[in-house]
Amino acid sequence: MTTLPEDTTPDRRASGGTESSPLPTTRIGALTVPRIGLGCMGMTMAYGRRDPEQGVATIRHALDRGVSLLDTADMYANGRNEKLVGRAIARRREDAVLATKAGILTVPGIGLPRGLSGRPEHIRARAERSLKNLGTDHIDLYYLHRVDPKVPIEESVGAMAQLVERGLVREIGLSEASAADLRRAHATHPIAALETEWSILTRDIEADALPVARELGVTVVPYSPISRGMLSGDAAAMRPGLLDFRRVLPRWSPKNREHNAGLVERIREIAEAHDATPAQIAIAWVLARGEDVVPIPGTSRPLRIDENLGALDVRLGAEDLAVLDALRAAGARYGRTGGV
Ligand SMILES: NC(=O)c1ccc[n+]([C@@H]2O[C@H](COP(=O)([O-])OP(=O)(O)OC[C@H]3O[C@@H](n4cnc5c(N)ncnc54)[C@H](OP(=O)(O)O)[C@@H]3O)[C@@H](O)[C@H]2O)c1
């Protein structure tokens, strides 16, 4: 059992099972995973400074609670995120299902994205580096972070398939791929997971890749299920500080923020009726999309693991879903320069 550092305690924390009762699970290819994973990106980048020790404690608490699926990427803080995950799981590798990614190039030192590479030699080199960073001899789930339009997807996935043959990777996934790319990739090697942004406010997947994922038996892993914290109703999430990536996202612009804060109030009303928190409602909405959906809410605070697992206990009714489905964000999910 991890000793929890001081933390903010949410008013309501539904249990989401207890430490002794196992979490509900589903499959990603041959992997068994809990219905909720943990996004680790924010522990080292994106949403302002975080204490790395708190990140380690959060991961260990997640593992204690059965949240085995840990999501990272080679480009998060130029490999420092993978190293943090590796440190947290040292001596308990068997408790973790490690998911990492390659394919986004970064500016050395700074870590900002500067382009894509789906070239086979790049993927091979990055896999070796990720294994070292994570301190493991295999990656459970290896994603192509973005499809590189300059490289046929068959070549990128072909390189990943070779990693499977060498025993370095268990399952292959794609991130943010279109329906057409998913089909082409799957014809090269079975694709176990599609990671893509999906939340009450970001629904793009529903019209394009989702039907194909379901046809092919690909598990969907929604990232940013709380819309990068916005749907939690946490006032701090609406006022990003200087080092916070959300400052440049259209949904946080002064023009759009007020409208979006109003949506959160609708979610808060539903949360109060369920004796739940807005973050739990946001995650429960994603869970309600189907058994083949495994959201990976990100947090760097141990107690929020417990809060977010409480979403498993929330049963949204048809009326709740109708209200939530009708909410529309002001502003695109990314600005002109894109992002992660
Ligand atoms: N494949 C891709 O291209 C891609 C892109 C983006 C993200 N991802 C992955 O998806 C994961 C999750 O997405 P995300 O982190 O962008 O967004 P998210 O899960 O929607 O939200 C994370 C934010 O919400 C806050 N938060 C979490 N639980 C909360 C709660 N119960 N109450 C209040 N605030 C809460 C976190 O702050 P604290 O840390 O302070 O708790 C953090 O700022 C990432 O960690 C990353 O692994 C992948």
Image (cartoon, rainbow, N blue to C red):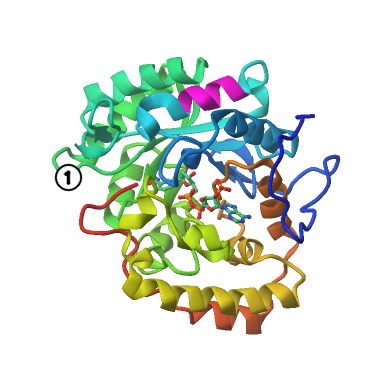
Under mark 1, the amino acid is Pro
Identify the residue shown where x is 42% and y is 61%: 210
Given the current orientation, which residue lies at the most extreme right position? 20
Between 170 and 76, the residue placed more toward the observer is 76
Q: Could you tell me which quadrant the N terminus lies in?
A: top right
Q: Residue 77, located in which quarter of the rendered image?
A: top left
Q: Is residue 340 above or below residue 130?
A: below
Please state the total of marks drawn on the protein image. 1
Q: Is residue 178 visible?
A: yes
Q: Is residue 256 left or right of residue 307?
A: left
Q: Residue 120, located in which quarter of the rendered image?
A: top left
Q: Is residue 74 visible?
A: no
The x, y position of residue 169, in whole percent, is: 45, 25
Given the current orientation, which residue lies at the most extreme front position? 242
Where are the magenta residues, as a range?
82-88
Label 1 CA crowd tier, 10 Å (few <14, some 14–19, many 20+) = few
Identify the residue shown where x is 63% and y is 42%: 301
Between 18 and 138, the residue placed more toward the observer is 18
Q: Is residue 96 left or right of residue 243?
A: right
The x, y position of residue 324, in whole percent, is: 55, 77
Residue 236: in magenta span:
no
Q: Is residue 48 above or below residue 99?
A: below
Secondary structure of the residue carrying tag 1 is loop
Q: Main secondary structure of the magenta part?
A: helix
Residue 86: in magenta span:
yes
Given the current orientation, which residue lies at the most extreme left position? 150
Identify the residue shown where x is 50% and y is 79%: 262
Residue for badge 1: 149
The x, y position of residue 101, in whole percent, is: 39, 34
Q: Is residue 119 left or right of residue 60?
A: left
The x, y position of residue 115, in whole percent, is: 19, 39
Identify the residue shown where x is 39% and y is 63%: 205
